[in-house]
Image (cartoon, rainbow, N blue to C red):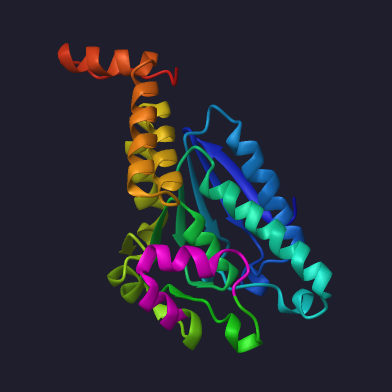
Amino acid sequence: MENVKLEKKNQIAYVTIDRPKVLNALNMATMQELWQVFSELKDDKQIRVVILTGGGEKAFVAGADINELAKNSPVEAKAYTHKGQATLDLIENLGKPVIACVNGFALGGGCEIAMACTMRLASENAKLGQPEVKLGLIPGYGGTQRLPRLVGTGLAMQILLAGEMITAQEAHRIGLVNEVVPSDRLIPRAEEIAQKIIGMAPLAIQYCMEAVNQGMNMTLPEGLFLEATLFGICCATDDKKEGTTAFLEKRPAHFQGK
């Protein structure tokens, strides 16, 4: 792969969108590589958490590749959008947490990728936004849907319609990012969170994420029913037996993801 790097260490996968000369702008080739990488990680039982970031110090992803986008026909643009949405849906529903480390600009498709991740950490110099309206466009990778779910309709409308960048600190205030940390602490902080997750029961992590993600699209009674169903499935796992036994025996649990 030319545009995306993948490294694996200590049950963590490190995915880096690596086009620093163009601020990691998204083109179709990059989206295809992201699809390939996350498809591989979804089935990799050795990987428990994914950390996603951008190459270089200036940008997570500064948006779409405008040179490519400007040449797209309506048919090509529709296919491009569907592919991007499918890739972000894969990231969101990977079955294992994906931590976005937003190091610099996360604009347009970059902000949309971050929003599809399970949680978002931002460096102190990060800037986020959805400036598509400045190009006569709207977000095409889920920005109009995920942003209001994260920050509420009013704030989402302001960000979407004004097309302005917001600081990492403001993104944290409105709930768009989980934490703001110094640049040199971005990956280490993500690793700290990842190690805590790795110590938990794999199936419980998977089902908890499924309950949240699917429940967001349900009524409260439907979501509660889903939660009860997944709770029941957890009770049939070896991990639940090990976890409760370890608690009663006052020892660390050793989960197998079964």
Q: Is residue 144 magenta?
A: yes
Instruction: Determine which quarter of the picture holds residue 25.
Output: bottom right
- With respect to residue 179, does 159 lie above or below? below
Looking at the image, can residue 90 be seen? yes
Q: Residue 242 placed where, x, y %?
A: 30, 14
Most foreground residue, 223 or 92: 223
Indicate whether 49 appears above or below 117: above
- Tell me: 78 left or right of 199: right
Residue at (38%, 28%) from the top-left corner? Answer: 229
Residue 205: x percent and y percent?
39, 34
> Measured from the top left, where is residue 195 in percent x and y?
36, 37
Q: Nearer the viewer, residue 53 or 110?
A: 110
As drawn, 150 above or below 223: below
User: Start and end of the magenta stretch?
Assistant: 139-159
- Which percent across, then down, holds residue 192? 33, 44
Task: State the residue at coordinates (39%, 45%).
Answer: 212
